[in-house]
Image (cartoon, grey):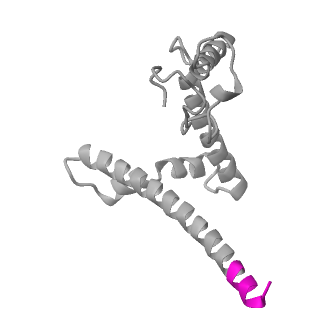
Amino acid sequence: MRKSTKLALAFVALAGAVGTTAYAENNASAKMRDGMMMRLDKAMKNSNGTITFDQFSDAMNARLKKLVADNGGKLTVAQLADALEKARFERMAKRIIARYDTKGDGTLTTEDIAGREKKIFAMIDRNNDGKIEKGELPKGRRFGRHRQWSDEGNDNDDDGMQ
């Protein structure tokens, strides 16, 4: 391979990596901005459409200030990382419980898990024969929020699944 071709490929790879990082940063920035705007809107609704600096400050960083206060007025990288990780995993746990909890009591039981598994099994078993064949497996993406169903190799088109 010629040197100019190698340089061009290296540049394309670098540009892709930078673009991916920029996209992730823009997406995170947009989420932070949306969260900030929601907090400001709430503060303004509670104060007849105007807020003072103290109200602004409380709306912006109340959780962060509480973490600093709870840790003697100083927060280390490790303490902040622990708090962020805990908050992230608590959000994940809440989503999982909400997804599986059939009784709505905020707990997860083996019956809840089995119920969810039966529901997913029934969605995949498109010909309702009690078995999943390779042709019934979803094509493309993994299971989850962004699943993609394909009708390839399936004669049953009246099940409403896509």
Q: Main secondary structure of the magenta part?
A: helix
Across and down, in percent, residue 41 comes to 30, 49
Percent of width and height locating residue 10: 71, 79
Q: In terms of image quadrants, where is residue 3?
A: bottom right
Q: Quadrant of the N terminus?
A: bottom right
Residue 61: x and y in percent read: 47, 53
In the displayed structure, would residue 107 be above or below residue 78?
Answer: above
Between 60 and 112, the one lying in front of the other is 112
Query: Which residue is depicted at the point 27% across and 55% down?
Result: 51
Judge from the rendering whether residue 19 lies leftward or rightward of residue 114; answer left or right. Answer: left
Q: Is residue 5 above or below residue 136?
A: below
In this rendering, the count of numbered labels is 0
Above or below: residue 9 compared with residue 29: below
**How far across and down, in percent of the image, does residue 120 sit?**
60, 21
| Left or right of residue 27, residue 113 in this image | right
Instruction: Specify the quadrant of the image occupied by residue 126.
Output: top right
Residue drawn 65% across the image and 55% down it: 75
Residue at the spot 61% in from the left edge and 54% down from the top edge: 73
Image: magenta residue range: 1-9
What residue appears at the point 70 percent right and 78 percent down from the top-left corner?
Answer: 9
Extreme residue in the right direction: 1
